[in-house]
């Protein structure tokens, strides 16, 4: 089984060309954060900015605007209930994240449907958290267009695939993916756990070599979505950029775990620029 490891990340995360500008490093849209889960959207957007995304916009509940502006002035904001504007912005993006803290009520469902209809083949879309739960609850198919990345934890994967957690093996997971590939052959599954595995459409199974139990804290997965979006926005090839993002998230946490019992999402986020610099120099 191929490994997601330091060497893979070093090969992908390279020094920036001198003549580059923000438009070269990905336009990223984060969609999430309802009235109760604003922190999830803030962590996702912060991770995207700190992992190097060129331009980040956050579509969220207006209750989160002030907190977001004060925590992360680098991000633009919009009201995710303005579906017309949201759909227009989706089309202008390289990478869209939908789900962190989105919630599962009628308003969240309407946003998910609007975004899925707007996706085109020029976007990568990372589907996480509440968006996965909504898809399972309302039998919403994977968008036929766009490059799809699913980032469920094991219970979200159970909801989406109907495979009980204790029956989630590479074989059963692959069988469920074959069904999803009929809707969209680009789907890559990032199945999160204490040892995260990545299932791209070529049938291989990648296993993450980094990570630790200090990461078992709310917001850890929200943070991963932003890192993955930034990596997809900046690095090529896209399949390896995604793997590098999975590694980066866990490897930063491993560095923090040398001296911290819990590896807080905010501390992972803060550490990203320095850690990426080290990888790019190595
Ligand atoms: N600060 C914020 O704004 C935060 C906002 N957040 C947002 O909240 C939304 C809901 O996401 P969620 O993951 O918290 O809840 P849900 O989808 O119901 O799953 C939990 C259920 O699954 C079960 N379970 C089994 N295996 C599991 C596993 N490996 N990993 C995890 N759970 C596992 C688990 O079992 P139990 O704990 O009961 O044993 C429980 O029954 C989502 O949009 C997210 O982005 C959070 O990120 C937190 C910080
Ligand atoms: N014991 C562990 N060892 C390694 N990684 C872990 C462990 N527990 C959780 N993680 C990681 O933390 C993240 C949790 O994601 P998720 O459950 O979606 O969090 P949240 O929705 O609260 O942000 C995943 O990336 C997962 O791999
Ligand atoms: Mg999550």
Image (tube, rainbow, N blue to C red):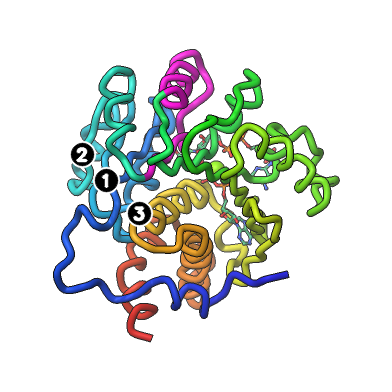
Residue 22, above or below 141: below
On the image, the x and y values in percent for residue 232 come to 41, 55
Residue 261, above or below 40: below
Q: Secondary structure at mark 2?
A: strand
Side (left or right) of 259 relative to 155: left
How many angstroms separate mark 2 from mark 1 (CA)?
Answer: 6 Å
Q: Which residue is mark 1?
A: 56
Assess whether residue 72 is covered by the magenta stretch.
no
Residue furthest top in the image: 106
How many angstroms separate mark 3 from mark 1 (CA)?
Answer: 10 Å
User: Magenta segment, which residues?
Assistant: 95-117
Q: Which residue is mark 3?
A: 233
Residue at (47%, 26%) from the top-left corner? 116
Residue at (65%, 21%) from the top-left corner? 139
On residue 182, the disc is none
**Mark 3 / mark 1, whichever is N-terminal:** 1
How many angstroms separate mark 2 from mark 3 (CA)?
Answer: 17 Å
Q: Secondary structure at mark 3?
A: helix
**Mark 2 / mark 3, whichever is N-terminal:** 2
Side (left or right) of 233 relative to 112: left
Residue 21 in sight: yes
On the image, the x and y values in percent for residue 75 come to 23, 44
* Between marks 3 and 1 in the image, the one whose residue lies nearer the viewer: 3
Residue at (27%, 36%) from the top-left corner? 92
Residue furthest bottom in the image: 282
Q: Which residue is mark 2?
A: 76
On the image, the x and y values in percent for residue 259 come to 48, 76
Q: Are marks 2 and 1 in contact (CB under 8 Å)?
A: yes
Q: Are marks 3 and 1 in contact (CB under 8 Å)?
A: no
Q: Secondary structure at mark 1?
A: strand
Q: Nearer the viewer, residue 149 or 238?
A: 238
């Amino acid at each position: 089984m191929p490994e997601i490891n330091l060497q893979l990340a070093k090969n992908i995360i390279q020094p920036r060309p001198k003549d580059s500008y923000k438009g070269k490093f990905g336009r990223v849209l984060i969609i999430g954060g309802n009235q109760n889960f604003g922190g999830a959207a803030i962590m996702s957007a912060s991770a995207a900015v700190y992992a190097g995304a060129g331009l980040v916009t956050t579509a969220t509940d207006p209750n989160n605007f002030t907190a977001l502006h004060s925590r992360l002035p680098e991000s633009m904001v919009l009201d995710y209930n303005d579906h017309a504007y949201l759909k227009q912005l989706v089309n202008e993006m390289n990478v869209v994240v939908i789900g962190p803290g989105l919630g599962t009520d009628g308003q969240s469902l309407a946003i998910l449907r609007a975004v899925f209809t707007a996706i085109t083949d020029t976007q990568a879309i990372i589907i996480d958290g509440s968006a996965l739960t909504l898809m399972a609850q309302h039998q919403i198919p994977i968008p036929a267009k766009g490059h799809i990345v699913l980032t469920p934890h094991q219970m979200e994967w159970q909801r989406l695939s109907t495979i009980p957690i204790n029956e989630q093996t590479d074989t059963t997971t692959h069988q469920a993916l074959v069904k999803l590939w009929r809707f969209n052959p680009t789907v890559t599954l990032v199945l999160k756990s204490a040892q995260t595995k990545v299932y791209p459409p070529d049938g291989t199974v990648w296993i993450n070599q980094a990570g630790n139990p200090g990461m078992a804290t709310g917001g850890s997965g929200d943070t991963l979505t932003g890192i993955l979006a930034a990596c997809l926005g900046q690095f090529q090839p896209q399949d390896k950029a995604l793997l590098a993002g999975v590694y980066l998230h866990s490897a930063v946490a491993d560095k923090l775990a040398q001296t911290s019992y819990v590896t807080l999402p905010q501390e992972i986020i803060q550490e990203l620029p320095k850690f990426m610099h080290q990888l790019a120099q190595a």
